[in-house]
Amino acid sequence: MSWWGKILGGAFGFMLGGPLGAVLGAALGHGFDRGLSQAAQPFQSVKADKERIQQAFFAATFSVMGHIAKADGRVSEIEISMANQVMSQMLLDAEQREVARRLFDEGKQADFDLQGILKQFRQECHRRFHLIQMFLEIQIATLLADGVIHRNERNIIHEIARQLGVSERVIDQLISMVQGQQYYAHTDNPRKPVTERDLREAYAVLGLEQSASDEEVKKAYRRLMNQHHPDKLVSKGLPEEMTKLATAKTQEIKRAYEQIKRRRKSA
């Protein structure tokens, strides 16, 4: 049974403790809060099983998403739309969508324990960097929802990355990559002539400069496809509901790679 099925089935002993358990328990409702207080224990071991990691990823993703959306002082309609878009891409059912919205609202609260949430999330992931990267990419997409990166938003995403053990250089590279991915997500015709902007965004998606060699381009493409492979991410603890997001990212990476190849071949 999936982590979601266990929770709905009343398996409270399976519930997380700690800050992640608190926000998830609040999002699930008072009945779950009672079971959580009786059965769930705080995080004890970094050797968490896959279903526990999936639960932690779901809770952290939507609560931190709400916190980031509030970073500039208000939650815009575009940011709410982005959160709903992620839920749609995940094909959440009505119950899951409602819990995700409540987690989003928990993240907007003034007393939201961001540091505690991130500390526990990092422990639960236990050095699974690909999971942490996927989490950060989702948060960056929220940050970029209105097309503007405000100073306090950039500060908060850098702080989130630092607490997850990710350097400023890497997070800035991820921001460029997500910007490129969002561009390619709205590029419907893969056969259209490659413009200079297409090319800039394509290199950003692969995290490369245009001066990169053919071998560097190929290696970057293979590395990113491996990092975002849905089956591999699920095996490491990505909730199965999020495979659609991972699949979409592999499509954007492939589209960018194909455009670079076409331009280089024509040159």
Image (spheres, rainbow, N blue to C red):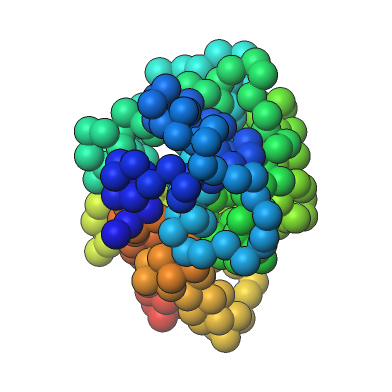
5 to 45, vertically: above or below: above
Q: Is 91 in front, or is 18?
A: 18
254 w.r.t. 82: above or below: below
Q: Observer-nearest residue: 138 or 22?
A: 22
**Residue, x 45% and y 34% (percent of image)?**
35
Residue 112 location in percent, x, y? 64, 24
Q: Position of residue 261 (x, y in %)?
A: 42, 76
Query: At 41% across and 31% down in the image, what residue appears?
Result: 32
In this orientation, does residue 194 appear? no
Q: Which quadrant: the N terminus? A: bottom left
Residue 178, x across and y down, in percent: 51, 50
Against 239, residue 119 (above or below) is: above
Q: Identify the residue at image location x=54%, y=33%.
A: 37
Q: Relative to residue 115, is residue 232 drawn left or right? A: left
- Direction from residue 190 to residue 181 in the image, left or right: right
Depth check, front residue: 205 or 120: 120
Report the residue that reaches farthest toward the bottom: 215
Q: In front here: 72 or 159?
A: 159
- Which residue is rendered at x = 71% and y = 26% of the image? 152
